[in-house]
């Protein structure tokens, strides 16, 4: 099997990971996590979202997070912006505090679109279009997240055709690259490959990333299945943090530590220092009062303690 020789990981822990936390997480702690991820060699970090604080209270400190970033050169900082209001808030600060990339987030499931962003898929595209145009006009990159590309908590299994349609709509409005997300972690390798192949109808393989939640323990298998198709961009959360407040029961993203362990073992370059990554995961886990949800981190921390 011909696997890609290198992989880029976007750590989405500070956003996807923390958005679902019930306990308050101080901005300082979020910044501490981001800094440790930078130190570990992450080149892309999804740091916050400009969504309604009524819907996702944990991200209400978005402007403070952007203000507090120390901005390591060569690192891309992205944020979620669901509409013009969110985009305008993201660029209300001085230019040096703008995100490098914004993410519009749609769903392949009509029901999930309604629950998550309170509008239909068609309406979401109408809302995203001016956001994408405004971002590109300002020289900000644009990514599109596609939720529920394999299964939906409300509609059940999602046909690849729905993913193909959504990817086409994203492409039409000028989205530059897309995330194929298994929001509730129900996917298995062939189904994930079908969702990726549907996306490949509109985006080149270099512009597609895999975003897998590990609810059913399939995320690493799905990562490997994606590598088989040549996909080399992935999203994960340090310490396996996370879940979406509008996808009940879904657990966190696949742990970045586990993905990096897998890739290192396969001789695939990531540019990430696993030991420092373990430190980042241990830091946020301790702040949250729990153990990292990462098998590799647990094994390595046990070894360190011995
Ligand atoms: P809405 O209620 O339909 O919006 O929410 P609206 O335009 O009718 O406005 C209602 C109120 O919200 C108004 O305030 C607006 O100003 C305010 P009021 O007049 O009542 O005081 N508002 C905003 N405030 C702050 N920032 C904004 C904003 N927009 C409106 N951007 C909205 C629509 C999209 C805002 C809402 O549904 C929302 O915030 N949803 C958040 C969804 C979310 O963050 N979900 C989690 C992230 S997605 C995810 O995790 C999946 C992903 O990881 C991939 C995967 O795994 O699948 C990406
Ligand atoms: Mg997610």
Image (cartoon, rainbow, N blue to C red):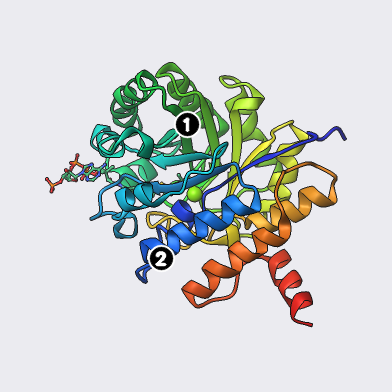
Query: In this view, which residue lies farthest toward the right?
Result: 1
Quadrant in the rendering for residue 232:
top right
Quadrant in the rendering for residue 127:
top left
Residue in the picture at 37% in, 47% down: 66
Q: Would you call the spot at circle 1 few (<14 residues within 10 Å), some (14-19), or many (20 or more)?
A: many
Residue in the picture at 32% in, 22% down: 134
Q: CA distance from mark 2 to mark 1?
A: 24 Å
User: Is the residue 26 above or below the residue 128 in the image?
Assistant: below
User: Is the residue 133 above or below the residue 250 in the image?
Assistant: above
Q: Which residue is mark 1?
A: 143
Residue 24: percent from left, percent from top: 34, 69
Can residue 186 be seen here? The reply is: no
Q: Secondary structure at mark 1?
A: strand
Image quarter hosting the C terminus = bottom right
Residue 299: percent from left, percent from top: 75, 71
Query: Label for residue 21?
Result: 2
């Amino acid at each position: 099997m011909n696997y890609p020789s290198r992989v880029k990981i976007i750590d989405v822990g500070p956003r996807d990971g923390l958005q679902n936390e019930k306990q308050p997480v101080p901005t300082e702690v979020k910044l501490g996590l981001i800094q440790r991820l930078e130190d570990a060699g992450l080149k892309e970090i999804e740091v916050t979202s400009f969504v309604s604080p009524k819907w996702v209270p944990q991200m209400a400190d978005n402007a403070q997070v952007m203000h507090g970033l120390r901005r390591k050169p060569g690192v891309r900082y992205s944020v979620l912006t669901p509409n013009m209001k969110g985009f305008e808030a993201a660029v209300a600060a001085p230019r040096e505090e703008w995100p490098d990339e914004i993410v519009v987030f749609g769903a392949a499931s009509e029901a999930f679109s309604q629950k998550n962003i309170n509008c239909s898929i068609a309406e979401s595209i109408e809302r995203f279009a001016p956001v994408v145009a405004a971002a590109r006009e300002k020289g900000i990159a644009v990514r599109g997240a596609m939720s529920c590309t394999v299964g939906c908590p409300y509609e059940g299994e999602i046909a690849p055709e729905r993913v193909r349609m959504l990817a086409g709509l994203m492409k039409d409005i000028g989205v530059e690259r897309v995330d194929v997300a298994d929001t509730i972690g129900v996917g298995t390798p062939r189904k994930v490959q079908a969702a990726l192949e549907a996306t490949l109808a509109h985006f080149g393989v270099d512009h597609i990333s895999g975003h897998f939640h590990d609810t059913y323990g399939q995320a690493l298998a799905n990562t490997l299945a994606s590598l088989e198709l040549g996909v080399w961009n992935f999203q994960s959360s340090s310490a396996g943090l996370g879940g979406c407040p509008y996808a009940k029961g879904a657990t966190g993203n696949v742990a970045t530590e586990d993905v990096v362990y897998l890739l290192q073992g396969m001789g695939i370059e990531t540019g990430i220092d696993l030991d420092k990554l373990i430190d980042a995961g241990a830091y946020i886990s301790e702040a949250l009062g729990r153990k990292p949800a990462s098998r590799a981190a647990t094994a390595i921390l046990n070894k360190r303690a011995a």
